[in-house]
Image (cartoon, grey):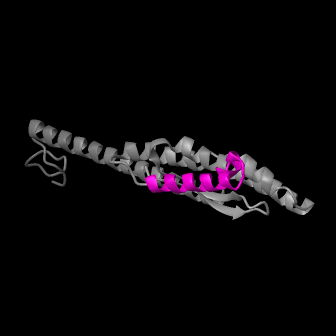
Protein backbone atom coordinates (compact mmCIF):
# COMPACT_ATOMS: atom_id res chain seq x y z
CA UNK A 1 0.00 0.00 0.00
CA UNK A 2 1.41 3.39 -0.96
CA UNK A 3 0.68 5.63 1.98
CA UNK A 4 2.11 8.73 0.34
CA UNK A 5 -0.27 8.24 -2.59
CA UNK A 6 -3.20 8.15 -0.21
CA UNK A 7 -2.11 11.27 1.59
CA UNK A 8 -1.81 13.21 -1.67
CA UNK A 9 -5.35 12.15 -2.63
CA UNK A 10 -6.58 13.20 0.79
CA UNK A 11 -4.91 16.60 0.48
CA UNK A 12 -6.45 17.13 -2.98
CA UNK A 13 -9.82 16.18 -1.58
CA UNK A 14 -9.43 18.61 1.31
CA UNK A 15 -8.33 21.48 -0.95
CA UNK A 16 -11.25 20.80 -3.33
CA UNK A 17 -13.69 20.91 -0.45
CA UNK A 18 -12.22 24.18 0.77
CA UNK A 19 -12.81 25.69 -2.70
CA UNK A 20 -16.45 24.62 -2.44
CA UNK A 21 -16.41 21.72 -4.90
CA UNK A 22 -18.47 18.61 -4.25
CA UNK A 23 -16.95 15.42 -2.90
CA UNK A 24 -17.74 13.37 -6.00
CA UNK A 25 -16.11 15.91 -8.29
CA UNK A 26 -13.03 16.15 -6.06
CA UNK A 27 -12.54 12.40 -5.90
CA UNK A 28 -12.43 12.21 -9.68
CA UNK A 29 -15.55 10.05 -9.97
CA UNK A 30 -15.94 8.95 -13.56
CA UNK A 31 -19.60 9.84 -13.92
CA UNK A 32 -19.50 13.25 -12.29
CA UNK A 33 -16.26 14.16 -14.09
CA UNK A 34 -17.60 13.06 -17.46
CA UNK A 35 -20.95 14.76 -16.96
CA UNK A 36 -19.30 17.98 -15.84
CA UNK A 37 -16.80 17.77 -18.71
CA UNK A 38 -19.56 17.47 -21.32
CA UNK A 39 -21.11 20.82 -20.48
CA UNK A 40 -20.36 23.31 -23.21
CA UNK A 41 -19.22 20.74 -25.82
CA UNK A 42 -20.18 21.19 -29.44
CA UNK A 43 -22.32 18.57 -31.18
CA UNK A 44 -19.20 17.28 -32.97
CA UNK A 45 -17.34 16.97 -29.66
CA UNK A 46 -20.31 15.17 -28.08
CA UNK A 47 -20.29 12.73 -31.00
CA UNK A 48 -16.56 12.17 -30.54
CA UNK A 49 -17.07 11.55 -26.81
CA UNK A 50 -19.82 9.04 -27.61
CA UNK A 51 -17.54 7.22 -30.06
CA UNK A 52 -14.67 7.19 -27.56
CA UNK A 53 -16.96 5.78 -24.85
CA UNK A 54 -18.07 3.04 -27.21
CA UNK A 55 -14.47 2.24 -28.20
CA UNK A 56 -13.42 2.23 -24.53
CA UNK A 57 -16.16 -0.30 -23.73
CA UNK A 58 -15.20 -2.52 -26.69
CA UNK A 59 -11.50 -2.48 -25.80
CA UNK A 60 -12.13 -3.35 -22.16
CA UNK A 61 -14.50 -6.22 -23.11
CA UNK A 62 -11.97 -7.48 -25.67
CA UNK A 63 -9.13 -7.61 -23.15
CA UNK A 64 -11.39 -9.10 -20.46
CA UNK A 65 -12.25 -11.95 -22.86
CA UNK A 66 -8.53 -12.70 -23.28
CA UNK A 67 -8.02 -12.73 -19.52
CA UNK A 68 -11.01 -14.97 -18.85
CA UNK A 69 -9.95 -17.58 -21.42
CA UNK A 70 -6.22 -17.39 -20.63
CA UNK A 71 -6.56 -18.53 -17.02
CA UNK A 72 -3.24 -19.42 -15.40
CA UNK A 73 -1.25 -18.57 -18.53
CA UNK A 74 -1.94 -14.84 -18.14
CA UNK A 75 1.30 -13.12 -17.13
CA UNK A 76 -0.02 -9.57 -16.76
CA UNK A 77 -3.39 -7.93 -16.57
CA UNK A 78 -4.71 -5.69 -19.29
CA UNK A 79 -2.77 -2.55 -20.09
CA UNK A 80 -4.41 0.14 -22.15
CA UNK A 81 -3.51 2.91 -24.56
CA UNK A 82 -5.58 6.01 -23.88
CA UNK A 83 -6.81 8.99 -25.83
CA UNK A 84 -8.03 12.11 -24.09
CA UNK A 85 -11.48 13.13 -25.24
CA UNK A 86 -12.70 16.70 -25.71
CA UNK A 87 -14.32 16.36 -22.28
CA UNK A 88 -10.89 15.87 -20.68
CA UNK A 89 -11.45 12.18 -19.87
CA UNK A 90 -9.01 9.45 -20.96
CA UNK A 91 -10.65 6.66 -22.98
CA UNK A 92 -9.07 3.28 -23.75
CA UNK A 93 -8.53 2.94 -27.50
CA UNK A 94 -6.24 -0.10 -27.46
CA UNK A 95 -4.98 -2.72 -25.07
CA UNK A 96 -3.04 -5.88 -24.50
CA UNK A 97 -2.86 -8.80 -22.09
CA UNK A 98 0.37 -10.70 -21.41
CA UNK A 99 0.21 -14.49 -21.85
CA UNK A 100 2.91 -17.10 -21.45
CA UNK A 101 3.67 -18.85 -24.73
CA UNK A 102 6.37 -21.13 -23.36
CA UNK A 103 6.06 -24.86 -24.05
CA UNK A 104 5.19 -27.37 -21.35
CA UNK A 105 7.53 -29.93 -19.81
CA UNK A 106 6.05 -32.73 -21.90
CA UNK A 107 4.48 -32.82 -25.36
CA UNK A 108 1.08 -33.47 -23.74
CA UNK A 109 1.44 -30.40 -21.52
CA UNK A 110 2.59 -28.33 -24.51
CA UNK A 111 -0.50 -29.39 -26.47
CA UNK A 112 -2.74 -28.39 -23.58
CA UNK A 113 -0.98 -25.02 -23.20
CA UNK A 114 -1.13 -24.37 -26.96
CA UNK A 115 -4.87 -25.03 -26.99
CA UNK A 116 -5.43 -22.63 -24.10
CA UNK A 117 -3.27 -19.95 -25.74
CA UNK A 118 -5.23 -20.31 -28.97
CA UNK A 119 -8.55 -20.15 -27.09
CA UNK A 120 -7.43 -17.02 -25.23
CA UNK A 121 -6.24 -15.35 -28.42
CA UNK A 122 -9.51 -16.03 -30.23
CA UNK A 123 -11.79 -15.42 -27.22
CA UNK A 124 -12.96 -11.89 -28.16
CA UNK A 125 -15.92 -11.60 -30.51
CA UNK A 126 -13.72 -9.78 -33.05
CA UNK A 127 -10.08 -10.97 -32.75
CA UNK A 128 -7.44 -8.52 -33.98
CA UNK A 129 -4.66 -9.32 -36.43
CA UNK A 130 -2.27 -9.72 -33.48
CA UNK A 131 -4.75 -12.08 -31.81
CA UNK A 132 -4.89 -14.21 -34.97
CA UNK A 133 -1.07 -14.24 -35.19
CA UNK A 134 -0.81 -15.50 -31.59
CA UNK A 135 -3.41 -18.18 -32.35
CA UNK A 136 -1.40 -19.27 -35.40
CA UNK A 137 1.78 -19.50 -33.29
CA UNK A 138 -0.11 -21.60 -30.76
CA UNK A 139 -1.31 -23.91 -33.54
CA UNK A 140 2.30 -24.34 -34.70
CA UNK A 141 3.36 -25.04 -31.12
CA UNK A 142 0.67 -27.73 -30.86
CA UNK A 143 1.70 -29.24 -34.18
CA UNK A 144 5.34 -29.40 -33.06
CA UNK A 145 4.34 -31.15 -29.84
CA UNK A 146 2.22 -33.66 -31.77
CA UNK A 147 5.21 -34.38 -34.03
CA UNK A 148 7.37 -34.89 -30.96
CA UNK A 149 4.75 -37.31 -29.58
CA UNK A 150 4.67 -39.27 -32.84
CA UNK A 151 8.46 -39.49 -32.99
CA UNK A 152 8.63 -40.74 -29.40
CA UNK A 153 5.94 -43.35 -30.10
CA UNK A 154 7.76 -44.46 -33.26
CA UNK A 155 11.07 -44.76 -31.39
CA UNK A 156 9.36 -46.81 -28.68
CA UNK A 157 7.84 -49.12 -31.30
CA UNK A 158 11.20 -49.57 -33.01
CA UNK A 159 12.89 -50.28 -29.70
CA UNK A 160 10.24 -52.84 -28.81
CA UNK A 161 10.53 -54.41 -32.26
CA UNK A 162 14.33 -54.55 -32.00
CA UNK A 163 14.15 -56.17 -28.57
CA UNK A 164 11.69 -58.73 -29.91
CA UNK A 165 13.96 -59.53 -32.88
CA UNK A 166 16.96 -60.00 -30.60
CA UNK A 167 14.94 -62.30 -28.31
CA UNK A 168 13.79 -64.37 -31.30
CA UNK A 169 17.35 -64.61 -32.57
CA UNK A 170 18.53 -65.91 -29.20
CA UNK A 171 15.64 -68.35 -28.99
CA UNK A 172 15.70 -69.74 -32.53
CA UNK A 173 19.38 -69.29 -33.32
CA UNK A 174 19.01 -66.71 -36.09
CA UNK A 175 21.28 -63.76 -36.68
CA UNK A 176 20.14 -60.15 -36.71
CA UNK A 177 19.70 -60.38 -40.50
CA UNK A 178 17.08 -63.06 -39.99
CA UNK A 179 19.11 -65.94 -41.44
CA UNK A 180 19.71 -69.11 -39.49
CA UNK A 181 23.11 -69.07 -37.81
CA UNK A 182 25.76 -70.73 -39.93
CA UNK A 183 23.67 -70.95 -43.11
CA UNK A 184 23.77 -68.67 -46.09
CA UNK A 185 20.75 -67.85 -48.11
CA UNK A 186 22.96 -67.70 -51.22
CA UNK A 187 24.52 -71.17 -51.02
Q: Which residue range is magenta in the image? A: 3-30
Instruction: Tell me if 78 is positioned left or right of 184 in this view.
Output: right
- Which of these two is toward me, 95 or 158? 95
Magenta stretch: includes residue 26:
yes
Task: Say if residue 124 shows up in the picture.
Answer: yes
Q: Is residue 153 magenta?
A: no
> Split into 4 quadrants, where in the image is the C terminus?
bottom left
- Which residue is nearer to you in this view: 108 or 55? 55
Which residue is pictured at 14% across the width and 52% down the height? 184
User: Residue 141, how many percent across, how many down?
Assistant: 46, 54
Q: In the image, residue 17 lies at what x, y percent?
A: 66, 51
Instruction: Report the label total.
Output: 0
Residue at 16% x, 49% y: name it.
176
Q: Identify the residue shown where x is 64% and y is 50%.
A: 27
**Residue 169 position in % (x across, y down):** 13, 41
- The residue positioned farthest toward the front in the image shown: 18
Which of 7 and 134 lies nearest the eye of the viewer? Answer: 7
The extreme right residue here reads: 43
Instruction: Name which quarter of the figure residue 42 lies in.
Output: bottom right
Depth check, front residue: 60 or 150: 60
Amino acid sequence: MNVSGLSSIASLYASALSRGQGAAEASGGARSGREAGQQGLTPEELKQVSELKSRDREVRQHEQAHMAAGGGLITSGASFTYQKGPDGVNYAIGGEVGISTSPGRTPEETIQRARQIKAAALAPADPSGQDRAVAAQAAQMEQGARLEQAQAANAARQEASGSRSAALARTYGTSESGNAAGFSAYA
